[in-house]
Image (cartoon, helix red, strand yellow):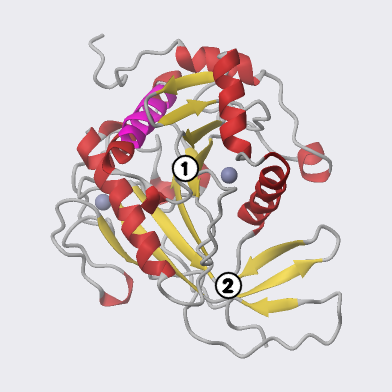
Amino acid sequence: MFDSPHRRFNPLTGEWVLVSPHRAKRPWLGQVEKTPLENLPQYDPNCYLCPRNERAGGFRNPDYESTFAFDNDFSALLPDETPAHASDHPLLASVSERGLCRVVCFSPRHDLTLPELDNVSIENVIATWTEQSVELCTKDFIQYVQVFENKGAMMGCSNPHPHSQVWANEHIPNEPARELELQKKYFAENNRTLLSDYLAEEHKRGERILFTNDHFTALVPYWAVWPFEVILIAHGNATRLNDLASAEVSALAKIMKQVTTRYDNLFEISFPYSMGFHQAPFDDQPHHEWTLHAHFYPPLLRSATVRKFMVGYEMLAMPQRDITPESAAERLRSLSDIHYKHEAH
Ligand SMILES: [Zn+2]
Ligand SMILES: [Zn+2]
């Protein structure tokens, strides 16, 4: 019987799907948001992420003052050894999947999203993601650590208190596995990393660059699918968050604040997105082919309510977009670097 986390293989695409049958009914605060992340209190007595409040299973949050990380009470992955799934047919292949899921609250404040935090607080968030990645990969069965944030009810975020997640997996998931294969191939052929060459070419052309500093560049990728998709690329040799020196962490915090501030200013709302870091696998290999980077995938297209849907042709054939990545970059660059909530009207 399938009652523990496992991955199933799709022989038509060669990709895997993670199945978590044990996952109980999760709490959902997202639906009650009328305007996502607007006019929230600094502290919400009913929020299970605010300091001192009670969570599922009777846990109580500490009176935390900076970031706060804990095991997800409704984890999609479990660290326990589970019996191997016996497949009785080659087209019905599955394997058990061990892992851990953590939640990282950005700060005790229920109302402060990433662009509203100061640089030092964002550096603390990055430091916590780094600590969590390093700690989780010390378990010998972990091969990949995915740091990500779902922001806004539109992205399925179940609680408006700004937070992110860190999922550690026994196997390398689809997206990083494909990036690994293609970055390896490029490195073998060119002896340079794919993303460093790509970044050099983008800097020559300039039209898709949003912001750059000594250690990171933010741009709308040439191949962007989502209307205002952004990629952050490290300039140096960092392959994982724990490779970053303190000046690089500080540069990353600055550029994340720049990107998320422009996002909010675009439609003058708290801009929903899914974002996450692609680090090299934690599999004891050197990964000279890998460049640390982060993807931002925001769904909004024309206003606070008009979003892009990935339906029909996108689901069945391939992604399609109307506005070009160049015009999206121009639009984002044209916005103020002062958050609209703080702009004097
Ligand atoms: Zn809260
Ligand atoms: Zn990536």
Residue 231 position in % (x across, y down): 53, 33
Determine the secondary structure under disc 2.
loop
State the residue position of label 2.
20
Percent position (x, y) of residue 203? 54, 19
Compared to 88, does 71 lie above or below? above
Question: Mark 2 belongs to which amino acid?
Answer: Ser
> How many numbered badges does the structure rendering display?
2
Judged by its main secondary structure, the magenta piece is: helix
**For residue 198, what is the image quadrant?**
top right
Picture coordinates of residue 15 (x, y %)? 74, 60
Say few, some or many: other residues with alpha carbon within 10 Å of mark 2 (under 14 / 14 to 19 / 20 or more).
some
Q: 4 or 99, which is in the foreground?
A: 99
Identified at 23% across, 55% down, the residue is 50
Give the residue at mark 1: 237
Q: Residues within 10 Å of mark 1 (few under 14, many from 20)?
A: some
Pick whichever of labels 1 and 2 is earlier in the sequence: 2
Nearest to the observer: residue 129 or residue 243: 243
Query: x and y percent of residue 167 in the render?
Result: 47, 62
Q: Amino acid at mark 1?
A: Asn
